[in-house]
Image: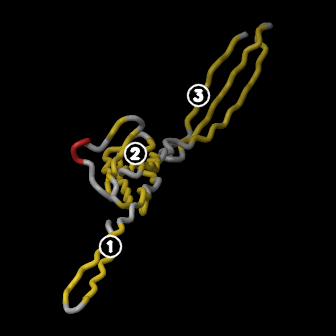
Amino acid sequence: MHHCLVVFTVVNDNSKCFCSCTVRRVPPHFSIPPENVEVMPGGSVNLTCVAIGSPMPFVKWRLGALELTPEGNIPIGKNVLMLNDIRESATYTCVAASDLGNIESDAEVRVKGLLLHRVEIFSGLFVHLIGGVCVTYYKFFWKDYISDEKIRRHTGWNHR
């Protein structure tokens, strides 16, 4: 964006134009930085990044050292990264660049963990002495509260 001041002055019925032009140069800064998001496994999300400055900066996305925006198609001012079928958490970096500098801002995409099972375990330990040998007998009982299954049990012997 350029700001110019133009002054017209009339002298003895002759029009004379005096022009003064001042160009304001502003380094890039984020007007809308990318935000951290949480997503369900397999979900989708759009990460938006908007940067302004004078001249307007190019805006691209990176994942670690991997450039995600095609080199020949880097948008100016705004870039939306569309992510689909997300399975792992990751940190994405938005980079805004112009002749006056580069800036970066990170966005964390966190995949929400699933509570697969909530299990309550009851146990019992019984020690018996049989013929001079110490025998431990154990029982485990559990109930899966997510699937609401019935109480299960597992028993076993341990000879010493």
- Residue 65 in the image: x percent, y percent? 39, 35
Q: Residue visible at 32% across and 50% down?
A: 81
Q: Residue visible at 59% across and 37% down?
A: 142
Residues under numbered marks 3 and 2 in contact, where contact means CB atoms less than 8 Å apart: no
According to the image, label 3 marks what residue? 154
For marks 1 and 2, give the CA distance. Answer: 59 Å
Q: In the drawing, does residue 140 fall left or right of residue 105?
A: right
According to the image, label 1 marks what residue? 20
- Residue 72 in the image: x percent, y percent? 22, 43
**Which amino acid lies under the numbered mark 2 shown in the image of this protein?**
Pro
Mark 2 surroundings within 10 Å by alpha-carbon count, few (fewer than 14), some (14 through 19), many (20 or more): some
**Which amino acid lies under the numbered mark 1 shown in the image of this protein?**
Ser
Residues under numbered marks 1 and 2 in contact, where contact means CB atoms less than 8 Å apart: no
Q: Which of the image's four quarters has the C terminus?
A: top right
* Front disc: 1 or 2: 1
Q: Nearer the viewer, residue 33 or 103?
A: 103
Q: Residue visible at 80% across and 7% down?
A: 132
